Image: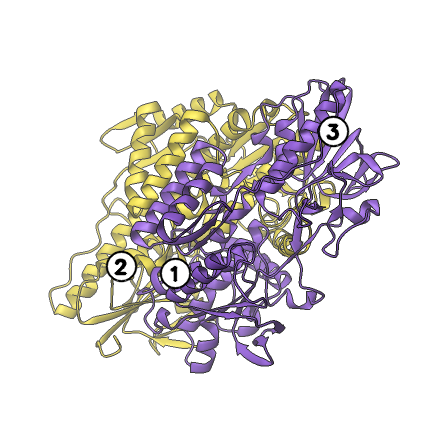
Chain colours: A yellow, B purple
Amino acid sequence: MTDNLPHHVVIVGGGFGGLEVARQLTSAKIRITLIDRRNHHLFQPLLYQVATASLATSEIAWPIRSLLRRRENVTTLLATVVDANGKTASVTLENGEAIGFDTLVLATGARHAYFGHDEWEPFAPGLKTIEDATGIRRRLLVAFERAERCNDPNERAKLLTFVVIGGGPTGVELAGTIAELAHETLHGDFRNIDTHDACVVLVEAGPRLLPGFKHSLSDYASRALTRLGVEVRLGHPVSQCTSEGVVVDGDLLPASTILWAAGVAASPAADWLDAPADRAGRILVEPNLTVPGHANIFAIGDTAHVVLPGGRMVPGIAPAAKQEGRYVAKVIDARLRGDAAPGPFRYRDAGSLATIGKRAAVVDFGWATFRGRIAWWLWGFAHIYFLIGLRHRLAVALSWLWIYLTGQRSARLITQGRERLADPPAIAPSAPAAAGLDAGRADLEGARDARQ
Amino acid sequence: MTDNLPHHVVIVGGGFGGLEVARQLTSAKIRITLIDRRNHHLFQPLLYQVATASLATSEIAWPIRSLLRRRENVTTLLATVVDANGKTASVTLENGEAIGFDTLVLATGARHAYFGHDEWEPFAPGLKTIEDATGIRRRLLVAFERAERCNDPNERAKLLTFVVIGGGPTGVELAGTIAELAHETLHGDFRNIDTHDACVVLVEAGPRLLPGFKHSLSDYASRALTRLGVEVRLGHPVSQCTSEGVVVDGDLLPASTILWAAGVAASPAADWLDAPADRAGRILVEPNLTVPGHANIFAIGDTAHVVLPGGRMVPGIAPAAKQEGRYVAKVIDARLRGDAAPGPFRYRDAGSLATIGKRAAVVDFGWATFRGRIAWWLWGFAHIYFLIGLRHRLAVALSWLWIYLTGQRSARLITQGRERLADPPAIAPSAPAAAGLDAGRADLEGARDARQ
């Protein structure tokens, strides 16, 4: 019913950037097709809380098509884009189907990067999707379950050692929350282990945590994490990840749970268009966020490398992606109205935030910094505010209030891939594939076995 | 630290029955080991709401060990029991480990039964575990997504046909909620299909729905479902389930989504002990719920066939399992105190409840019956009341309030097993196994691919 509208805008990716474009495009002259391989928009800043059993998956994910239901001119497609072609002005779906566009917006996001060590992935999973989060949650909880059943002290120590690689916001937030999970939430639940023996190690190759923040806040974060019982190792590059643990400075740190928060790489969008890209695969876009040589193709969010006047790069965070999305919508609207094109994209730094457990945080507004409890409340309100919809705000607020008051986390579910607790191979840092196969068995057995 | 306590009670299964035993055993003379293959106690009466995107998984599941954390003499074990032996007085775990007991309580639950047609399972999954529920949720939502992309009218009609087999409470509740999901929640979200075209069929071999209820309520349920747009087919046995659909009375009803709610069979517990069992595998227990020939082994819940004075069998519902658990705890305590054994188990029928969508329900207390809106409120309050813990009550109440006011369901996530929407084989009622393998791929790609 919208096919008669002249201008077709195809948006690939329903993350913060892509969704913002769809929401901000107001021109009546267009029809929009938003394509995402998942049916949900994910609030990634809180994904670590799903991984640590603090929030339920549905509290931070929204069906994209219901977010856009009122936008009559928007069609949402659950599909995977495998190629984009500027000459034919079309994108190709996983089934070979081609979808033509007048304007294309690439907001295809990023995946973890292992700096040429992809073989580490099975042992040190990263955190990008809902499945990553529930998978990590499963690994964390199963490690304690296995320790409870383990009689070999060395093996038990290994099971209770959790290594987080990468000292950025995600790494800091994961490490802090895992420490709270072990020392507070799970304490008293076990009979054969004392969860206070759990050892959480945060390894950062660089000289300080939270490189994006002021030094004073980095130092504060280290101290706050140490208070939570996290062992912070700065200036220690990881040279190896295996089922035995991680090798730091040539020494093996035995650990059965390793989490990767050390880096991301962009989607293959740059390859699709043979566009110039940085080492992480982000397209080096023009000042108006178009792909060089393609005036009608935009790249935003983690797909784009946007240089700031000072030479710094726009950070790969949600607010930046949203600003870029809003800008691109303006440009497209202006073109359709025949107005003068807006000036080059300008990034407004809204500040950086990171939590350290449930009582401390660091907030860097540039013009002012906050730390500790007040920063935590700032962080909390900011994130509740940016959640979409009253219903999710209420649900998340309730979950947080509960954890804050009782220390109990309600999402402590070991689901999918029911590891066979007693035979290490099935668990020993299982590759995502293996985990998936396990999930297969779980599905099968879930349906076949008796519940016991 | 509890090993010095003389009497060891092993409970297999953390469902309603097993958990109740652990909670009610008060004697200081015992230590308890509760073994479950899952880490969570599941509130199965609401599992259909997870399958229909109304509730989040963590809203109806609790970590067993945290439910029992204050019970110093209870050890919770995440393990799978594969055998039980009366002579050696021990149970065997999946890793061969044997655990001795003085008293054993078998509360191992049930699985779906296909009346000798296990080959139907891949095409008509049942609803027993969290994974079953998220798997069914995925199938329901993916069917609409595929229909949105489908141009063949016949294929589209098949994709929009949902068949529920079995007219008991679960079947009635599934059919009603799927109808609401299609006609209310999803309406307006799609551009190429009208979700009002979705066809929900409830097939029951017997002469009426809800056989456990008074006839008047069965009739009311049929009318209420019809009002919701469900096609109710009574007295029609299903003779075949395939990827094409279901065969009813020799006619093929093309449907890509078939759900099984027609029957359950007990766990293999009876085989472990060579105990007398009914056709569904339930142990024919003594009046005091012990297994014939094993005075120190009890069977409760779906594991036991308990005959009522009138000759009827105690129904396989949560309240019955809880009453049996409480009774067994009394018997064990009495034995340890040397008191006279309590009389035979007596079942108090607390009544039967079933919802039909979000505005109607039927309640049969025996001495009184309710229907419609008031019954729905009775049902709602009863279920909120029986949820464990204030936090879950608040969360579920919020979810229901929201659905009631807005019709929007917040748990509409397609997770795990990312079906390739465009190639039917990957989806066409995928066996749980296949779904699992898909989940494997999803995990893998979740971690590897760009989010798009």
Mark 3, residue position: B9
Q: From mark 2 to mark 3, how far is it between C-alphas?
A: 61 Å
| Distance from Cα at disc 3 to Cα at disc 1 | 46 Å
Of B190 and A27, which appears nearest the observer?
B190
Q: Is residue B387 left or right of residue A283?
A: right
A254 or B184: nearer the eye?
Answer: B184
Residue type pointed to by label 1: Glu
Q: Residue at x 40, y 27 (%)?
A: A404
* Label 3: how many Cα within 10 Å (few below 14, some 14–19, many 20+): many
Answer above or below: position of B425 versus B269: below
Using the rendered view, name the quadrant where residue A39 is placed.
bottom left
Percent of width and height locating residue B112: 64, 57
Residue B180: assigned label: 1
Rendering coords of residue A83 (x, y %): 43, 70
Q: Quadrant of the C terminus of chain A?
A: top right
Residue A223 visible in image:
yes
Residue A250 is at least partly visible in this image:
no
Q: CA distance from mark 2 to mark 1?
A: 31 Å
Find disc 2 in the rendering and name its residue: A21
Q: Position of residue A170 (x, y in %)?
A: 44, 39
Mark 1, secondary structure of its residue? helix
Image quadrant occupied by the N terminus of chain A: bottom left
Mark 2, mark 3: which one is toward the viewer?
Answer: 3
